[in-house]
Amino acid sequence: MSLFESLILGLVQGLTEFLPVSSSAHLRLTAAFAGWEDPGAAFTAITQIGTETAVLIYFRKDIARIISAWFRSLTNKAMRSDHDAQMGWLVIIGSIPIGVLGVTLKDQIEGPFRDLRITATTLIVMGIILGVADRLAARDETGGKHRVAKERKSIQDLSVKDGLIFGVCQAMALVPGVSRSGATISGGLLMGYTREAAARYSFLLAIPAVLASGAFELKDASEGGHVSWGPTIFATVIAFLVGYAVISWFMKFITTKSFMPFVYYRILLGILIIVLVSMGALSPHAAESAG
């Protein structure tokens, strides 16, 4: 992998990680359309450490408060009713599904799931689900001619049950094209949470999953020697810088705007991939040579 390729892929990772469009799908598609080798699951997992570092810095006050409260709750019973302490447990509980499925489905994730026909299908299906969830949220927020506005749940209303559902939604993002933020935010909206609450918990929930996945891939890559470290580290730095700017913009965007532009984009991109594959202009296994 050249430095130019790593620059472009780092930009794509940073631009798409926090948007509900699937960063893994865009990394794969960028390589396919450019005629490059598939950057692979290891490259994706490692560069996601860069974007996740942006989350750690952006939410540093929330994270420090949650970690502090959680540790104190281990020895202080009075702290166990504290929201931040409970949030620590909810992040742990919500991380279980993707941890279990990530290990058991590792071969499928790095193999059959990378078929572009699957990517196109998940882009469209999850786009439709996100659109439905967004419409329901908008209806509750604005009400209507014969309906009053309905108050949606905040992050303080998060329960163990809802945390697990969020976790299952996040685990769906193991399939390229689903989108971690798209799946968890859609799940949150369908459960009645505000856009801001769903996005905030989505980003916090991603921290242990992404860091664990990155560490796992780092270990395998170090032992196997199949990663170009220079370009990969360069792409990770680029992903961090761009990702921080994107997450800052996105958290402001969702407080007043609809997700529908992302819905239309996902559906159109999915249709384009299906058309190109059907016409033979794009192989469903394009750019898979690097695995």
Image: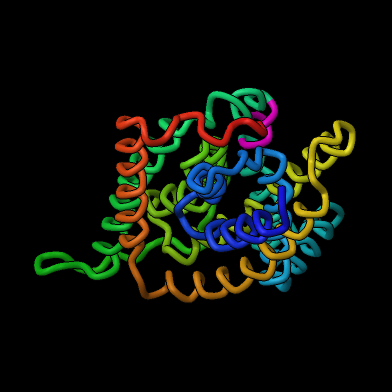
Image x and y of residue 288, in percent: 59, 32
Please say whether residue 224 is visible from this viewpoint. yes
Residue closer to the observer: 36 or 54: 36
Image x and y of residue 154, in percent: 48, 64
Residue closer to the observer: 76 or 19: 19
Give me the residue at 47% from left, 66% from top: 196
Give me the residue at 47% from left, 42% from top: 178
Give me the residue at 73% from left, 62% from top: 53
Give me the residue at 56% from left, 48% from top: 27
Residue closer to the observer: 77 or 106: 106
**Does the stretch in magenta take in 114?**
no
Image x and y of residue 171, in percent: 56, 38
* Quarter of the figure that contains the C terminus: top right
Please say whether residue 66 is visible from this viewpoint. no
Magenta stretch bounds: 98-103
Residue 160 found in image quarter: top right
Q: Is residue 147 left or right of residue 117?
A: left
